[in-house]
Image: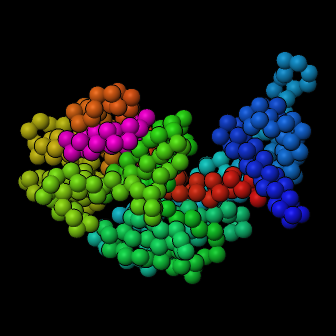
Amino acid sequence: MAQRRRGTVRDLRRDNRSALLRALYFSGPRSRQELAEATGLSQASVSNVTRELIRDGIVAEIGSVDSEVGRPRVLLQVNPEHGYVVGVDVGETRVQVELFDLAMTERAKAAFPLDPARHPAPEVVSRILAGIEAVLADGGVPHEAILGVGIGVPGVVQQRPEVVVDAQTFGWDRVPLERMLRAGTGLPLLIDNGANTMGQAELWFGAGRGAQNTVVGLIGSGVGAAIIAQGTADRGLPASAGEWGHTPVVVGGRTCRCGNVGCLEAYVGAEAMLARYAEAGGTVTAADQESALAAMILEAGTPGTVGALVVEETICYLGAAIGGLINLLNPERVILGGWAGLLLGETYLDAIREAARGHALRHPFATTSIELCTLGPDAVALGAATLPLELFLNSGGG
């Protein structure tokens, strides 16, 4: 019985620290009185917990503001240099690694190219490990200051008993990614689908702030989505929810990289868009996908060109897929991101909205906004870095 009481006190202390840290992190700086109002904790609890957090170097006093009654109120904030987090984006064409402080200010960045046609797991692992070491060296941050490394990868991520990744477009079948990385680093690792990490970044810092039910679409070489329900990513069982790119949009349609036919990715992913462009007689001159897609979208501004035809068809397929999401999930927002999604959406967002309108029921469409991600193409790495940060906040900085 005594052990249960000690556990309860320990859990309460952790929960109080977590509540204060989250309030400071997402709505700071705040005074102690404002923290009490925001968290529902007593003034005495707030004073005790903030004293601990300041002693531990997690929270800092940063000045004061005048009070209507009595002495000025001291403002508190999470100390951005208490620790650091690393975010990794494993994409089709590169592995990108970024180092952030606790304010999510970028301190260092490294990128390693990948051959879009082949993604052997040992090669990807070596680039991740090299990237981690590079950003720590560039940022002048020792290993012991790192709270954790978050990694966003394509495909289905199964978390237990160890992280295993199935990514058909990479040719990965139950790749023991965590075990392979553990052979090269002792840093804490958290691994999730890249669309989910992008979704969390937008939910915390971007176009998804304030929304409880949102779908964030990632359109790069392929297509994925993060489904946010009640403010939390819905990963399904076993963590395969969000494979939006492999939902069928054409019966008996084009062959997708996953081996099935008619998938959304076979029409809307950058690789598929460029393939359709070449098949229709367009000339792809740029060596990399991003430059080639940008050139095709630029050409699409001239009516009657091959680029215009492909972009128009792509918008139709994408609109149908978004309309289906709206009918099925009735989200507050559909947010489009990924480098290809941003390239397309920056010019054609209104056309995408109209295409979705034609495939959605009137009432759910009227209550859903369709927007672009605001964090840019680096949102996957930023979101991956929030994985260890979230663990830190939830644990009360312990």
**Viewport quadrant of the N terminus:** bottom right
**Horizontal relation, residue 287 to residue 394: left or right:** left
The one nearer the camera, 146 or 166, is 166
Residue 198 placement (x, y as % from top left):
47, 51
Q: Is residue 179 visible?
A: yes
In this view, the residue farthest toward the top is 68
Instruction: Identify which residue is drawn at 71% across, 63% down.
Output: 145
In this view, the residue farthest toward the front is 1
Provide the residue span drawn in magenta.
316-339
The one nearer the camera, 378 or 151, is 151
**Which image quadrant is residue 19 in?**
top right
Taking the magenta stretch, the answer to whether it contains residue 334 is: yes
**Horizontal relation, residue 300 to residue 55: left or right:** left
Taking the magenta stretch, the answer to whether it contains residue 306 is: no
In this view, the residue farthest toward the right is 70
The one nearer the camera, 257 or 231, is 231
Residue 293 placement (x, y as % from top left):
25, 51
Instruction: Identify which residue is drawn at 62% across, 59% down.
Output: 388
Q: Is residue 138 visible?
A: no
Residue 143 placement (x, y as % from top left):
68, 69
**Which image quadrant is residue 256 in?**
bottom left
Residue 231 placement (x, y as % from top left):
54, 43
**Viewport quadrant of the C terminus:** bottom right
Principal secondary structure, stretch drawn in magenta: helix
**Horizontal relation, residue 42 to residue 122: left or right:** right
Q: Is residue 113 above or below residue 222?
A: below
